[in-house]
Each structure stands twice: as C-alpha cells, then as structure tokens.
Image (tube, grey):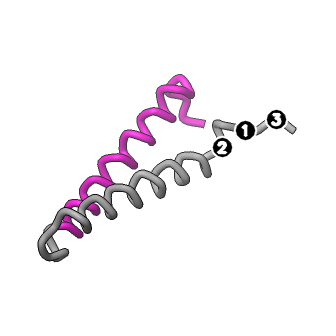
Amino acid sequence: MPRDTEHPVWSLVRLVIMFAGVTTFLYLNASTFDETEVTTIVELMILAAGFEAIKRRVANGGDDS
C-alpha cells in the first residue's frame, strides 16, 4: 500500500520529531531549564510551522482551494 507523503499528518510528525530534538538539546545544554528555553522552543515552533505552511502552499501552486 503506497504512503501518502503529502498528507498533513507528516508535517506534524516532522515538527514533533524536530522539537523533541530541540527540547532535548536545550535541556542538556542549559544550566537551568527556565522560561528562556521555553520561549526559544515556542518561537522556533511558530517559525517552523510557518515554513511548513509556506512549503505546502508553494507545493500546491498557491491554490486557495
């Protein structure tokens, strides 16, 4: 059975895996895991989600449907 690699769930899976790595990296390198690390994670998640949305829009040819 072929996989639908364009399904929206794969974008979410990529983001979850990426941010699990980012969170682990920040946790292991921070002397204290505080609000600055949480702020970094949230800002990067918003940025990455924006790039995923742009990528999907460009892949669909900018079609609004």
User: Label 3 to label 2, Cα distance in Å?
Assistant: 12 Å
- Say which residue appears at 53% left-offset and 26% top-offset: 59
Indicate the secondary structure of the residue bearing disc 2: loop
Image quadrant where residue 29 sits: bottom left
Residue 60 picture location, percent across and down: 56, 28
Position of residue 6 in the picture relative to residue 39 (left or right):
right
- First in residue order: circle 3 vs circle 2: 3
- Disc 1 marks a residue whose amino acid type is Asp
Is 48 drawn above or below residue 20 in the view shown? above
User: Label 1 to label 3, Cα distance in Å?
Assistant: 7 Å
- The stretch of residues the image draws in magenta is 37-65
Is 4 drawn above or below residue 42 in the view shown? above
- Disc 3 marks a residue whose amino acid type is Pro
- Disc 2 marks a residue whose amino acid type is His
Indicate the secondary structure of the residue bearing disc 1: loop
User: Label 2 to label 1, Cα distance in Å?
Assistant: 6 Å
The number of numbered discs placed on residues in the rendered structure image is 3
Work out whether residue 3 or residue 32 is closer to the camera in this orientation and state it. 32
- Say which residue appears at 66% left-offset and 43% top-offset: 7
- What quarter of the picture does the N terminus occupy? top right
User: Is the residue under label 2 in contact with that under label 3 (CB below 8 Å)?
Assistant: no
Main SS of the magenta part reads: helix
Work out whether residue 65 or residue 54 is closer to the camera in this orientation and state it. 54
Residue 24 picture location, percent across and down: 33, 63
Question: Label 1, on which residue?
Answer: 4
Q: Is residue 13 rendered magenta in the image?
A: no
Q: Residues within 10 Å of mark 3 (few under 14, many from 20)?
A: few
- Say which residue appears at 41% left-offset and 60% top-offset: 20
Question: Label 2, on which residue?
Answer: 7
